[in-house]
Amino acid sequence: MNNNIKILILTIVSVGLVLAFSSAYVVNETEQVVITQFGRIVGAPVKEPGLKFKLPFIQTANYFPKNLLEWDGAPGQVPTKDKTYIWVDTFARWRIADPILYFQTVKDEFSALKRLDDIIDPAMRNLVTSYSLVETVRNTDRPMDTFDVANYDENKNRQVRYKVELGRDEITRRMVEQSRKKLDEFGMELVDMKIKRLNYIDSVRRSVYDRMIAERNQIAEKFRAEGKGEASNIRGEKEKELQKIKSEAYRTAQETKGKADAKATRIYADAYGADPDFYAFQKTLELYKKSLSKDSTLILSTDSDLMKYMKGLGN
């Protein structure tokens, strides 16, 4: 009898433990729970963390994340309004705002990501194709901080400024707005979305690189031509200054030489003026020396001045 009572007590305790274990569940800070009974939702979602209870065996706790979740879109080829084909890579952050509606329509994260693909990607394509490339790339039409060769206008010698109507941030905001309205019916909230990367497709990228190289070469040639012209001007100014310096130096030298010659002539004149007859005699002898030699024959009149000293020698 005692043994039967012990067995009964143990059985009751075991059943109680099993019932307690199957009826208790734990919700942590990053989770929310929807209770279902035979597949039907029972009560409000449980969002507060802690130890919770449900009917054992007939009710099931369905866990869903409460924190932010990520969506990473596949890069896609999209044409812009100005017919430029680009690769657009986007990402987004979302969360489960209404777990009951989410459970009724989506049920799991895999299906939710498929819904995001079907909603965000068309919104992105719709807005990118509605505006030119510069709208997706830039936020404002402020002047570029660096020299932009692709937008250089050599006729006006300045950069061409595009008119940006919306800008990248506004286009992204409209993508979020369009997608958010469609996700509400699935109990999902799109928190934010950004364009992770933009790039040209291969064929366009090659042509853009070739055009950039050609434009850079053209601008480089223009700069080189301007440099050569400036160098020619500098060399011309140098030659002009050099000729001016030479002319002034030559004039100064000639003036100095003239003054020296005048001074020398004056000294000679003063020296020879002291005895004119001796000067005449010396000059005549110099003339004899230059014009007469042993093979020379000179015929002169007896009245010639050159014969004056010859006569004296003869006497």
Image (cartoon, rainbow, N blue to C red):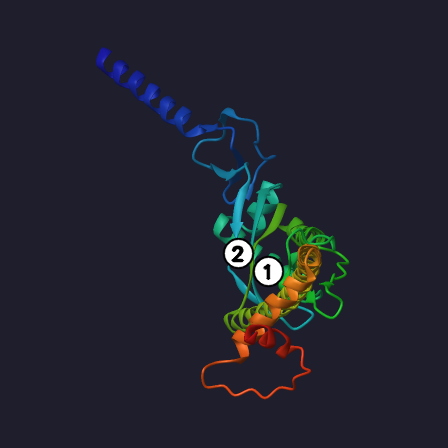
The residue carrying mark 1 is 121
Front residue of 74 and 141: 141
**Outermost residue toward the top in this view:** 2
For image coordinates 26% across by 18% down, the residue present is 7
The secondary structure type at the circle numbered 2 is loop
**Quick check: 91 above or below 223?**
above
Residue at far front of view: 315
Q: Amino acid at mark 1?
A: Asp
Q: Quadrant of the N terminus?
A: top left
Disc 2, disc 1: CB below 8 Å? yes
Q: In front: 290, or 149?
A: 290
Residue 291 location (% of width, % of height) = 54, 80
- The count of marks equals 2
At label 2, counting other C-alpha atoms closer than 10 Å, the crowd grade (few under 14, some 14-19, many 20 or more) is: some
The quarter of the displayed image where residue 281 is located: bottom right
Query: Is residue 155 in view from this perspective?
Result: yes
Where, quadrant-wise, is the C terminus in this rendering? bottom right
Badge 2 is on which residue?
Answer: 73
Residue 216, given in percent of the width and then of the height, sits at 58, 67
Q: Secondary structure at mark 1?
A: helix
Between 306 and 118, the one lying in front of the other is 306
Q: Residues within 10 Å of mark 1 (few under 14, many from 20)?
A: some
| Residue 262 percent across, percent down from the top left | 71, 58
| Residue 263, position as x, y percentages in the image | 69, 55
